[in-house]
Image (cartoon, rainbow, N blue to C red):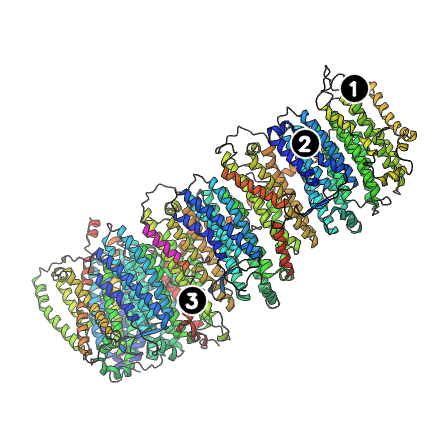
Amino acid sequence: METYKIYILTSAVLFVIGIGGVFMARHFIKKIIATVIMGGGVFLCFVSFAERDALTFADPVPHAMVITGIVVAVASAAFALALARRIYQLTGEQSFPIDK
Amino acid sequence: MINLPTSSLPAILVGLPILVATLSLFFRSRGKAVVGLLGSLLTAGLALIAFVEVAQLGSVIHILGGWEPPLGILLRMDPLAVVFIGMTALVGVFISLFAWWYFRAQESTNGKFSLFWPLWLFLWAGLNGLFLSNDLFNLFVTIEVIGICAVALAVLSGKTDSLFAGLRYLLAAITGSMAYLFGVALIYGSTGTLDLGLLGQILEPGKTTTFALLVITFGLMVKMAGFPFHFWLPPAHSSALAPVSALLSALVVKGAFYILLRLWAEVFGISLTYAGGQLIGLAGAVAVIWGSWQAFMQTNLKLIIAHSSVAQLGYLLMIFPLLILAPGVVAGSADWLSPAWTAGVYQVMAHAFAKASFFLSAGIIIMAQGHDHKGSLRDLASRMPMTTMAIGIAGVSLIGLPPSGGFFAKWMLLKGVFLSGQLWWAPVILTGSFLTAGYVFMLLRLAFAPARDQEPFRPVPHSLQVVALLLALGSFLIVFPAENLIQFLESSETFGSGIESIMEGGAYGNN
Amino acid sequence: METTSILPLLILGSSFIPGTLILLLREDQSSQRTFLNIFGAVAKVSLIALVFAGYMRGEDYTFVFSLAPGLNFTLRVDLLGLFFATLSAVLWLITTLYAIGYLEGGRHRRRFFAFFSYCITASTGIALSGDVVTFFIFYEFLTLSTYPLVVHLGTDKAVNAGRTYLWYTIGGGTILFLGVVGLSVIAGPIHFGQTEIIASLISENATQLAILFFLMLAGLAVKAAIFPLHSWLPISMVAPAPVSALLHAVAVVKAGAFGIIRLVYDVYGIETAGYMNLLTPLAVFAAFTIIYGSVRALFQDDFKRRLAFSTVSQLSYIALGVAITGVLSSTGAIVHLVHQGIMKITMFFAAGIVAETYGFYKISEMNGIGRRMPLTMGAFAIAVFGMIGLPPVAGFISKWYLGLGAIETGSYWVVLVLLGSSALNAAYFLPIIYRAWFCEPVQELVPRRRSGRLETQALMLIPVVVTGLLSLAAGVFAAVAGSPLSIAREIAERLYLL
Amino acid sequence: MIWFLTIALPLLAAIITAFIPAGRRGSGLFFVSATLPAIWLGLVDESGVTAQWFLLESHFSLDTPRRILLLLTGILWATSALFAGSYLKDDARRGEFSFYFGAAMAGNFGLLVSAEAASFYTFFALMTFASYGLVIHSRTPFARRAARIYLVMAIIGELFLITALYLAVKSAGSMLLADIPPALAEDPNGPIIFFLGLIGFGVKVGAIPLYFWLPLAHPAAPAPASAVLSGAMIKAGLVGWMHFAPVGLVEWTSLSFLMVSLGFTAALGAAIIGLTQVDPKTNLAYSSISQMGVMTVILGIGLYGGIPGGLILPALALYAYNHGTAKALLFLGTALPARVGGFWRILMWAGLGTGVLAIAGGPLTGGLWTKYLLKTFLGETSLPGAQTFLILLTLSAITTTLLLSRFLHLLHRIEAPSENAVPAFILPWILLLLAGGWWTLSPALLPTGLMNHITKENGIMVFFWNRFTNWSALWPITVGIVVMAFTLRFATLNLWPAKKPLLPPGDFLHIILLAGDLFAKLLRKGISLLESGLHSVQGPEQIFYRVTDNKRTSQISDSAETTLRRWEFVGIGFFIFFLTLLLLL
Amino acid sequence: MSVLIDSLLAILAIYLALQCLLAQRLIQTVFIFFAFGLALALTWVRLGAIDVAITEAAIAAGFMGVLFLDALRDFSPAVSKKQQNLEAVRNPLPGNDTKRPILPRLALGLGLVLFLLISLEAVWNTPEGKGLTVVTGVMLPDSGVEHPVTAVLLNFRAYDTWLEIGVILMGLLAIFAAGGKEVYRKSGMTAEDPVLRQVILFFTPILFLFGAFLLYFGKSGPGGAFPAGVLWGAIGILLHLGGRPVLTVIPRWLLYLILTIGPGFFILLGFLLMTTGSTLFEYPPAYAGILILIVETMAAISIAAALTAIFTNLNQMSEEPDKIESNN
């Protein structure tokens, strides 16, 4: 079995875990982490394809996209974290009241 | 596509707002506003120039860095894109003007609102970028730009409600983006290209493609608050500041719709089936009914308006079933495609104008009364006739009464429904209109009703009311150039000849 | 043939522009407002006169603006349209005067007059529409522009009435919309009068066309207040008298009736409609409404409510006349557009005057009022006789033609309906006359408003007298060339010759 | 021109006398001058005109019977107007009276000169509704009640009338009234149409069984109004019948028989009921019904065929003329006994006596002549039972005499003023006396054809001085007078009611009302039930409001929306959406 | 062998991801998240994506982890009974759940499983696209740099990269909007601890140099603006934690200058070149190398500043005066 196949399956699993986490987790931080895990899965998928398509060097375009994606995801996650902390400060809530 | 005339305008349309936004950061609150307003006007002017240019040259492209696709990124400004850009510019200018006066009127309360200007310009750049983009990954970046800016704007008021709503919105947006990106990854993996034009040619139907289509659709549906995923919209839109609510509902959600439209039409045409379109249509139909009903049942003005957005976006989804041919229908005979397209475009525009006006009016009312319980509308007709008028006119457009843009959209939609023989959508459209009338006129009824309590009534600058009214009128005025606009759009890649891609599609899974 | 003329647009503008300008004025600039109002009204009447004259010379006035392929905004002058436009314009002029008097010193006059102007714009627009789409546009515009007038008083009652009004009219509009779209899809853009288009389609699309017909009919029937879609009309009585007057005489209800006429005569064509057997249900509903409205009117003590139910009843005369094929009944239906208009407007004017001058809203309070305001109640009495169908008032002419038309086609039951309605009309109207003229006042009658020696304000009195005399004249001089009857007869004859 | 003046002048006079104080003072003269065109038309044979501008193109023209009636009408209105001018001088509502008086006058003239359906109907209605104002004039409860019943009956009449007109005009294909009888004669539905007209105009005529408003309404009006009501306006119904009746063209046995028998029933029955009354005007009203019954008989004979319309209709008109003048004389006369004293009373009684004789067909009166016309036709007709009818006719002379002598008796009971007084309005009364029924013999009124038919070569004077005819006219009257005198003389026989009528005026009406009363409660209950039912059936919007304004509805929809907003359900929604779409793609 | 390693790594990543979400205590979650990030970084290395690995380790695991860790200062006190209850409730095992309806969770679980299967099938069957390796290889000489990833990032798809640098700035603005302060106060954590200060002083130049090295090395090998930016950002974070909040000592305009110089210079350069007739971000091949280096440097500076600002903002969030007031 080729390497990328393992990771590509992993990527799908991570994505599903992430999306499940978003839907099921209660705590803000867990929800945010779940999105990051989702992102991890997606990036893994990209990079696996890059490895698959490697010649003398791995396909650089997915790499570049993943780097971009990671930064974007981190920016979003940081923002989400800021919101979560702000909410906690103001209300003491750690999860969405509607989900309780 | 490479052979199209090139122009530097697409690059400037994205670059300039960001530059101005960056510049504005150096200023303190008043300066930010000045720079921001100037930047808005500048960007709008650019959009106008772009419109003129496309009208003259037809579609233009801009190959970034000189690297042609698939390696590089190409910005494509076709009529459809430029119509969206133009709409953004028009609505954007009005909202900017509104924001200028709105924040000036409230300057003493919070200086933080000046962040509105850079964020809004970033958002604008993101929107322009989105409309121009011809690259799957670039689209992801632009929707992220839009998403972050949109949420940031949504929480600008700093109220607890808006924070909760913002976080919910942000999580939904991230989830949507990630799902979208997953699809992009799979597509890239199976084709090795990201350029929409190339993808449209080489994408093969298959399980992976279908899956990618599904997650992309899901991601975009979340972003545009399509029916089962509308959960974030009402709280987010209703708790934001007035100009922000207007932006979010008028423009931001349309971005996702735009991508969805483009991708379905240009890339995934081959994987679509009639039944799939029907399901999207069904989602839209449920959104129309559910959103309208919810709006009808709300007691707060902004919540009413926000729920109404859910319904109005449902209409947008309802054009999809009309764009996908049933098995056995020949492309040449499908004369309903053009009405359906027009319906989509006009629904976007009409809703943008009307909803922006609506939210701005809500902002005015909140400014005057201090809250937005629908009781605050009482006696509005005599206190603020102009705002009442704006609400009335915008509402009329939402309902789809002639001769508003909303009417035009519904007319075309119904026409498409009739021509295609998919008559089952007609009752939905009408029920939606009917329920919309219910809440719009509930508001108007209150506006004419006598005031119950002697709440303090603060006067609101006239300029704000004028802006709201002008936007509302805009939702009517867009009808007048309709014929030219349709002709203009038909010269577009996607809209006219590009439609063929959908019609030829549908082979897979149809038998 | 497609000559474009701006005149129809000007006719619309002659009320739309003043309306908008009024909206821009301040509330206290009443003299400017009055000037605009009267200027607009007079301009409209003269423009219509101009167009009428031109049309009679054989000129064609068409204004087409294409919104989208198959979706045109068409204003076109034809005799039927002009007929209705003239009615609207003239009555608008009169009602404007009345309203100026009626609302003197009232609140929100700016809003009132602006929407009043819009309302009449919509009404003339309906009259001059050249095709179904344009008709629909103005039809909806009418709904909207009337709403602020209905809720003008701003009381809870008024506002709730407005709610019901809107639910009905919007619902009707929605259904009409469906029909209009469907029709334009099946038949393409149809100008009024191009009945051959539908006629050529009936072999293939009979069912669809029938369904569309009934959809549109249902939509129009709301405004025409045909049972069971009539309840909005009595409820929206809360509006000020000039509004009720215009609403009932011209603008709203007539839009529905006029629409039915257009639909049957100019879209489907009588032959086609008759061939497809579409008219019988209309006739039945209309007939039932005639009786039902009258019966309900019997029990109303509120003056305006009684008038409203009477309107419900009277309007269906038009629908009934349309539903019976034949020159005579068509003439009756078309002429009743005008006749009912001037008679009913007189009645509402009178009701408004009584309410404003003496504060009487109930019929039971009106004892002896006739001697105090002989001109008002005299005009009212004329209108009453017209409504009953007594000569020589206008209503007789309509009824005469309707009755003859019914007999001509052998629909004897229609005659019975007409007679029953006449009897009921007498039963609910004559008591008002009796109280006003032949009963002694219960207490001393003290007028609240009056000017000089006149029984009430001159601006209110003149209109009612004028319309009263008009309703008399329309009957007495029915045979004169240029009378409503003669025009209606010409319209009907043209219809049947085509 | 004169045709229009006939109608316009009364209207003008009505307005002048109603609204202008000077006009109010000189109302009598104004009205008299307003009648002049009508009288002129009645006397001079003018050719008809067409008014294209009026209504649905009007035609005005006259034929002999209508000319006779117009003359009668003109005279009656003129004298009544003069009479009213002074009689109602001090009445508070004089202006109002003049208004209705003038309007009714215009209507009455108009319907006579109209030659086509629309204007005929117009003026008929004008007259009918204007006379409501005359009936209710005194505003007493009695008058109000009478007026109400009058109005109801009038409207019912109008409804039948308009129906008949619709059908007739449709049948004739022309609006001209002259075309109607031939058309009806041809039309298989002719009898039905005529029957509808019979009912429609029968209300006005006071035919059995539609007469019951009449004894209430005619007496309720002031004397001059009663005079025209009973003398002139009642003839309008007759005119209507004449317009519809294809006399001499058809042989409608049953209709003819019906009319004749109803006519005789009226002639005898009304007289008998009239005897039970105590009010002289009621008495006269019954007499009118009775006399109209006789006229019904004449028309009924005409419908059996055999006798040309050209003979019967003028005869009918002449009969009407005689009756009209005499009845008006008597009605006006009811105002006299209380005001006339001394020497003038002799004149008064003489005049009244003449009137009574004229109606009863006494010797040397116009009544004799007009009745003789009827007898002639009865003799000539082949209608079965004609002989019986002749006897009945004689009998009716007796009953009429009885009735009218009872009338005189009732007048006699009125206390006379002690001094030698005479009111100004005796002058028009005398004028009317002079215009009496003898004129029916004059060549000006009597068509030559008719005269030739009746008198053959003998000439009219030969007939008039004929002893036999006078005798046969005299004996029934004598019988009547003797019976009356006897019953009054002997207390045991004097069973005449003095204070309260034996049968209330309107007799038959009370049965209806009684029946109505029986059902009234039920009816009222039903009506209120109907109304409340209709009221509670509020439009569908109410149901809608009930749903939307309900708290529970909003709770349910709120909780549904909350559920949809929960992340878990978003997830479930996602999977459902995803899987469905997957299956569909 | 490699399959085994890969499989183990994959299973580890999945396990950590699951554990991360299922952990009972928040602090566990955060630490497992760190571990997950490292596992992922290892994965990148296994897949030959060194750049990604560096970025992942630096930003996704490192920076994000620090942010989460910092956030625990807020949330950890609350992870007492209340939080545990919540977590217990969150357990997807049936039977434990008494308060909440079970059906939705079952449905959700079922959906997840189905979705997993479908996505596995989808990724497994992905057709063999060729990727863009060949094209990149052909174009690489024209790009001005030798390392293909850098070439893609800063030349071929510079537009994306530019937007992305912008996104970081927007993220910062968004955090401001969410309630952060534009004005930097002195950190509450004073670095009285001499050891910490020494450590910080020791690491600062090393980090700086390493960052500069990465930046320059990015031209020919893994590295570039992002890792460099993160490393420099780490300096700022450390200094902040060490009681030397850099962002407060520099003037406001300078702060904004360094925050915006990355995207600003990027786009200004692009516009400048556009005036010469080329398209946006079209570098003349001769100067491409040097221009890219300058752009990278600017970008790294901005990224560093932005990350620092993000951290300090979040770090300060728990000490918002309004919060303190409300607590009192």
Q: Position of residue A26 (x, y in %)?
A: 30, 60
Q: Is residue D211 visible?
A: no
Q: Amino acid at mark 3?
A: Asn
Q: Chain of mark 2?
A: D
Q: Position of residue D88 (x, y in %)?
A: 66, 25
Q: Which residues are magenta?
A: B457-473
Q: Secondary structure at mark 2?
A: helix
Q: Secondary structure at mark 1?
A: helix
Quarter of the image for the C terminus of chain D: give it: bottom left
Quarter of the image where one finds residue D197: top right
Q: Secondary structure at mark 3?
A: helix
Q: Earlier in the sequence, mark 2 or mark 1?
A: 2
Is residue D203 placed above or below D365 in the rendered structure?
below
Q: Are marks 3 and 1 on the same chain?
A: no
Crowd band around label 2 with a 10 angstrom C-alpha radius: few (<14), some (14–19), many (20+): many
> Is label 2 in contact with label 1 (beta carbons under 8 Å)?
no
Q: Chain of mark 3?
A: B
Say how many tags the image has. Answer: 3
Q: Nearer the viewer, residue E33 or E53?
A: E53
Q: Position of residue E67 (x, y in %)?
A: 21, 63
Label 1: which residue? D346
Q: Nearer the viewer, mark 3 or mark 2?
A: 2
Label 3: which residue? B484
